[in-house]
Image: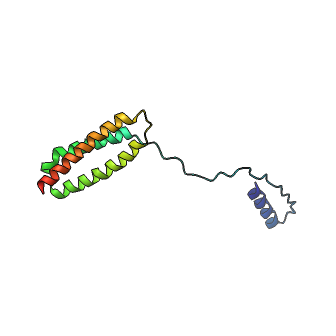
Amino acid sequence: MAIIEAGLLGAAILIGIPAKAEVTAQPALSQFHPLQPPPAPPTDAKAEVQELLRQTSELDDQWNDLPPAQRNQRLTALQQQATTVQNDVNNLPPEQKPEVQGMLMLAVIRLANILGKMRAAS
């Protein structure tokens, strides 16, 4: 409102129209609410664990056919993904945790199996 009044007053001055400026005090805000970013969309931890399981199984199945550099790259990515997924699982409501934690445990066991293959090959 104040910006509009200032703009009208400025226009009146430019074109030479006498203007009467009335400034009314705006009511003070009783509470201050700083702007906050919108909450992040909820993650689907179960889908993330299923994807981790799929990728871990795929790496396990393809292990012997992959060159060592690609094995290491994919294994490192899966380990990082497992850490992220674990954090998401920890934030699940208590009633959802047991099922998803069980699925995550399978993925961790498969990752440990792959690490064993890697050490055996060294």
Q: Where does residue 24 sit, x and y in percent of width and height?
A: 83, 55
**Can residue 84 be seen?**
yes
Quadrant containing the C terminus in the rendered view? bottom left
Q: Where does residue 60 sit, x and y in percent of width and height?
A: 18, 45
Q: How is the image coloured?
A: rainbow
Residue 50 placement, left or right of 8: left
Q: Is residue 3 above or below residue 63?
A: below
Residue 77 placement, left or right of 14: left
From the viewer's side, name the closer residue of 30 and 92: 92
Q: Is residue 92 above or below residue 82?
A: above
Q: Where does residue 32 sit, x and y in percent of width and height?
A: 68, 52
From the viewer's side, name the closer residue of 43 and 90: 90
Q: Is residue 30 above or below residue 101?
A: below
Q: What residue sits 31% from the left and 36% below the top?
A: 102
Quadrant containing the N terminus in the rendered view? bottom right
Q: What residue sits 36% from the left and 45% below the top?
A: 86
**Can residue 66 be seen?**
no
Residue 45 placement, left or right of 114: right
Q: What residue sits 78% from the left and 63% below the top?
A: 11
Residue 1 placement, left or right of 81: right
Q: Is residue 3 above or below residue 107?
A: below
Q: Where does residue 121 sit, x and y in percent of width and height?
A: 12, 54
Q: What residue sits 15% from the left and 54% below the top?
A: 119
